[in-house]
Amino acid sequence: MASKLQGNQSKQESPHLKRFFYPLDQAVEKPFNWKQMLRLLTYIKPYSKTLLPGSLIAMLISTIVRLLVPILIGQVAIDVAIKNKDVDMLTYLVIGISILYLLNYLGNMFRIKWINILGQRVIYDLRENLFSHVQRLSHNFFDKRSAGSILVRILNDVNSLQELFTNGIINLLMDVVMLVGIVAILIALSPQLALAVLVILPIMFYISTKLRRNIRRSWQDVRIQKSRLNSHLNESMQGIRITQSFSQEKENTEYFSGVNTDNFETERLAMKKSAYFGPFVEMANAIGTVILISFGAHLIINGTITAGDFVTFAFFLGMFWEPISRLGQIYNQLLVAMASSERIFEFLDEQPNVEEKKDAKEFKDMKGHIEFDHVQFSYNEDRIALHEISLEMKQGQTVALVGHTGSGKSTIANLISRFYDPTKGAVKIDGHDIRDMKLASLRNNISVVLQDTFIFSGTIMENIRFGRPNATDEEVKDAAKVVGADDFISRLSNGYETEVEERGNILSAGERQLLSFARALLADPRIIILDEATASIDTETEMKIQKALKQLLKGRTAIMIAHRLSTIREADNIIVLEHGKILEQGNHDELMKQKGEYFDLVKSQFQMLDAL
């Protein structure tokens, strides 16, 4: 493992990156285009009649004041009032300029206030839209991505747009208006001097254009490295018990150091490239000032311009480079925003593989009769998980799926819940192809209990009620009593109001499983899928649950996936699978008489028990 832990290697040479590199978490190769940015700006549309107009008006007031003051100083104060020694005019000018600066202060205050509120609301909407969209995506989307990389999109990438929406957009408009006004005034004051000073602009534009692609790609790399860093952090926290049990804390820390170093170096490089623009503008400013002084003095001596014209020109030239410099910073914000928005829109453009038809129908009073009609399914092109199987699960039956790992048991359960769609054939419930039915009406009638039970942060009561949010407290407690969870809940410090953290670490595996049973049963489904649901429960608890299930599953269709064959002896139909094909099916007694694959599986398990 030591060969992996070289934290100071270059990005090209860092082997540890391979572990956290997800194929779909790469730089998005798209040219910088305003169509992409315009799509991002559509999130401002809901506020186009409220916060945005006020911000724009405040911005225009500030800009007009800044353009007006130098003209009053150069053209009126110097060339008229001072030249004619008009003290009264100078007094009025001082008062007028003071009022203008007060207007500028008020304009800036309201602009900053309103645009910050606007920016925060846009970020709120964007993050909520992204999260809501991700919630609707199919399971294959999550199969190909780590939880950490998804979190980065929703948190970091959206956060990186905050500066753009709170300052960048309005500042961009303000600086563009300012530049147009300044250039127009400079040309009006002295076309010759303006041409001489602004001759370096084409050179600036050419050099800055050359930097754009390189800087943009660097910021994309920053986003990718942050995604990988977050993925490793998420994995490390989830697997902390395994890390400690194998005494791998030091190795894992060194591993993190390597990923963290790559993240640091990538961001340092991006900042370094972005920093080139500021000094470049300062150098152009210095060149422009030299041209102004030398050529401007020549024009004054020749009488082409007045002293007031020269002072006004100098004022505006100083103001000219200020928005140019800010535009460089805003352009860096645009590059960061483009890199982040491309990654955000990559998710938003992702379409679920399992889509609901526009004319989808509601399940009304589902009975629970399930039929697989020549169903074939593959998770990818390389491996077929199910080979055109046909089977029937009658209403109210308890059907058990058995077979070795990878035989297709969980795939059948996933297809019934329509987490995936068949590659060929059809899955039908009550005679309806489930692809023709509304997803919500399908899944509201199905409860799934997994071996790895997920417990959410919150109270015991809230976790059980997750299956049916409108259930009363009494209904929650009744469901817990039926599955035998009420006994251990009553012993907790705060009973049903006891707070449990993410994944329910204060509870034993068996207790978490009992909660999942209560959650599933409270939903009152027509179909219950138990995927190795009793694997983490001791024999005594399992006996209680089996007894409760006999009452609860009456009138419901139950699909049980189990490796412990003792739990499925009472099933109405046992389907034996091997490599995605049905080998045999029947009840326990029928299959034992056949002395086929099921007989061998039961025999091998009893032999293991005897050996123990």
Image (spheres, rainbow, N blue to C red):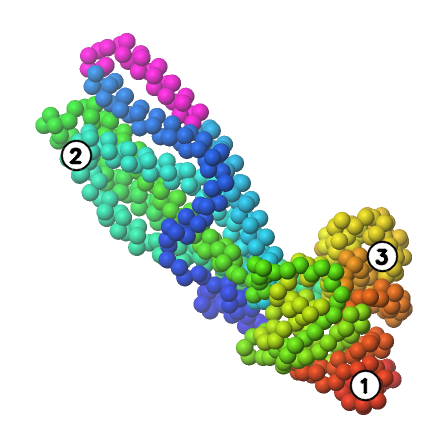
Quarter of the figure with residue 89: top left
- Mark before the other along the chain sequence, 1 or 2: 2
Sequence order check: which comes first, mark 2 or mark 3? 2
- Answer with the quarter of the image where residue 420 lies: bottom right
Q: Quadrant of residue 94?
A: top left
User: Which residue sits at x=27%, y=48%?
Assistant: 205
Is 87 magenta? The answer is: yes
Q: For residue 480, which numbered disc appears in the image? A: 3
Q: Amino acid at mark 2?
A: Pro
Specify the quadrant that holds the N terminus.
bottom right
* Labels 2, 3: front one: 3
Instruction: Give me the disc on residue 191.
Output: 2
Mark 1: amino acid: Leu
| 592 vs 470: above or below | below
Q: x%, y% of residue 93? A: 30, 15
Residue 2, percent from left and from top = 57, 71
Q: Main secondary structure of the magenta part?
A: helix
* On screen, residue 463 above or below 43: below
Q: Provide residue 86's location: percent of width, then percent of height.
A: 24, 10
The residue singled out by tag 1 in the image is 591
